């Protein structure tokens, strides 16, 4: 596929990621990069250089809906002062520097870039299979190597804290099934309908 991505976007995006990586590594540790939003940030960066329609489609089917929800949550609280779902609570934590919080604004431009690339390249319907496989690898890895207090990708409980209602392993299986059926599957049908 011939690239339709302007060089300025490739370079500025890459520079942003190169700044974010050491800052996040120092502040949050390497496990933080297992968040699906971080995986998406890196994957879209690769796609901007390689023209991979599949990679963009995978990130769209797996994460775009949640990124849009993050934006709705952030701007809703920014303009109304009221918490909507709590995805962006940390953006209003004054103990975190403005620079650190500013880096998290990638959640704003990331969905815009994904949608633009889908308009330019279309949606690869094979993405549902590849993203489901990736999700079912990332979630157990996150469960095995991260601190439950961090609750990355909510593998230990919904929201910011681990749950204690059902066995941890059963909860993880439920999370894997929910990602596949409540996020990836409906996103696939919507993206297929809009972009193909």
Image: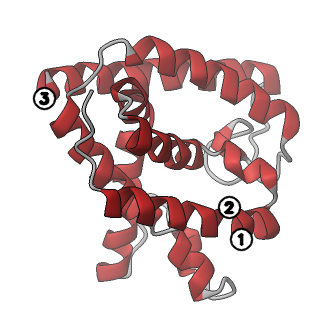
CB under 8 Å between discs 2 and 3 = no
From the image, which quarter does the N terminus lie in?
top left
How far, Cα to Cα, is label 2 from label 1? 6 Å
- Measure the alpha-carbon separation of dots 3 and 1: 37 Å
Q: Is the C terminus in the top left, top right, bottom left or bottom right quadrant?
A: top left
The answer to whether 30 is drawn above or below residue 143 in the figure is below
Secondary structure at badge 3 equals: helix
Marked residue nearer the N-terminal end (2 or 3): 2
User: Neighbour class for label 3 at 10 Å: few (<14), some, many (≥20)?
Assistant: few
Which residue was labeled with disc 3? 194
Residue 69 pos. (x, y %): 36, 52
Q: Residues within 10 Å of mark 1 (few under 14, many from 20)?
A: some
Q: Which residue is mark 1?
A: 23
Picture layout, residue 157 above or below residue 58: below
144 relative to 5 in the view: left or right: right
How far is mark 2 from mark 3, CA to CA? 33 Å
Query: Secondary structure beneath disc 1?
Result: helix
Q: Position of residue 102 (x, y in %)?
A: 51, 78
Q: Label for residue 99?
A: none
Query: Left or right: 106 with respect to 18?
Result: left
**At numbered mark 2, what does the secondary structure look like: helix, strand or loop?**
helix
Residue situated in front as seen by the camera: 174 or 59:
59
| Residue 131 point in image, percent of width and height | 49, 22
Residue drawn at point x = 35 percent, y = 41 percent: 65
The numbered disc on residue 21 is: 2
Report the residue at 67% width, 54% height from top. Answer: 160
* 167 left or right of 111 in image: right
Asked if labels 1 and 2 touch by Cβ distance under 8 angstroms, the answer is yes
């Amino acid at each position: 596929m011939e690239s339709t991505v302007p060089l300025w976007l490739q370079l500025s995006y890459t520079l942003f990621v190169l700044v974010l990586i050491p800052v996040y590594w120092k502040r949050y540790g390497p496990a933080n990069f297992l968040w699906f939003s971080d995986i998406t940030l890196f994957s879209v960066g690769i796609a901007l250089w390689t023209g991979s329609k599949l990679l963009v489609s995978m990130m769209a089917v797996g994460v775009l809906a949640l990124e849009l929800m993050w934006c709705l949550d952030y701007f809703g609280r920014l303009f109304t002062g009221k918490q909507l779902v709590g995805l962006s609570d940390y953006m209003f934590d004054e103990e975190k520097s403005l620079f650190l919080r500013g880096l998290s604004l990638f959640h704003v431009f990331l969905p815009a870039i994904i949608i633009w690339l889908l308009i330019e390249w279309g949606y690869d319907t094979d993405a549902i299979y590849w993203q489901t496989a990736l999700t079912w690898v990332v979630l157990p890895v996150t469960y095995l190597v991260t601190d439950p207090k961090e609750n990355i990708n909510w593998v230990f409980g919904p929201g910011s804290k681990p749950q204690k209602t059902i066995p941890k392993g059963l909860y993880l299986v439920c999370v894997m099934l929910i990602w596949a059926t409540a996020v990836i599957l409906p996103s696939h049908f919507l993206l297929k309908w809009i972009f193909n």
